[in-house]
Amino acid sequence: MVSDPETPNTDPQPDPDTDPETPSSGIDLARALLAAARAQARATGRRPTSAAESEATRRRRTRRANLARSGSGPDDRDPQPLGSTVERLVVDRGWELPVAVGGVLGRWAEVVGPDLSAHCHPESYDDGIVTVRTESTAWATQVRMLAPTLVRRLNEELGDGTVTRVVVLGPSAPSWRKGRWRVAGRGPRDTYG
């Protein structure tokens, strides 16, 4: 039977999905499954990806989508006040105690009073021990007697248990060494302080 090219073909084409008697070829079945998967992805709001899209492209697109966009509101990338930036740095590095101790030792005259601060100054803080240098041996003796009061006053400023002891040093003697070489001996026969 020869079909006339001018007359349309009125024979109904069988639908492979609805007609169970029509066998589907592998390619037709794959196309139907792909179309169903794409429709389901669109329905759930996901974008169907092509098979040619690489894993690196997917990761790049995800990374770009997760980046914060700049807007009209404040952002972490905006210039920050210096005080809050320094405070965040101190907290991040764990420098709270050394900064607090440095602040108290910097305000030594306010903490111990003008009379005592006129004759002694703090030299260092190490593991709860504050080292204080005095201008004379008489003041060294006086500050040694005031050591428990100094510990209490420093702990009021810094927090309980921060300072455990105050070590008092007398005045330092001048060095008589001149040059790189020296001769062993008793040194000058004088006392200082």
Image (cartoon, rainbow, N blue to C red):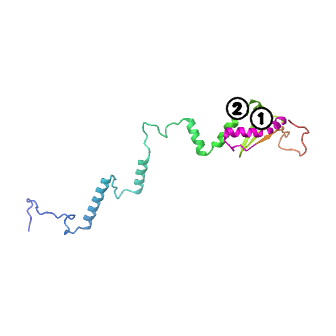
Q: Residue 93 is drawn in which quadrant?
A: top right
Tell me the element at label 2: helix
Which residue is under mark 1? 120
Tell me the crowding category of disc 2: few under 14, some 14 to 19, or many 20 or more residues within 10 angstroms, Cα based.
few
Could you tell me the amino acid type at mark 1?
Cys
User: What is the residue that sits farthest to the top in this orientation?
Assistant: 114
Left or right side of 3 for 77: right
Left or right side of 186 for 15: left
State the CA–CA distance, disc 1 to disc 2.
13 Å
Residue 123 seen from this side: no
- Quick one: 76 or 145, which is closer to the camera? 145
- Residue 93 is inside the magenta segment: no
Q: Position of residue 159 (x, y in %)?
A: 66, 41
Q: Position of residue 163 (x, y in %)?
A: 71, 43
Q: Magenta stretch?
A: 137-165
Q: Residue 146 is drawn in which quadrant?
A: top right
**Residue at position x 77%, y 32% in the image:** 116
Q: Position of residue 50 (x, y in %)?
A: 34, 56
The disc label shown at residue 110, or none:
2
- Residue 149 is inside the magenta segment: yes
Could you tell me the amino acid type at mark 2?
Glu
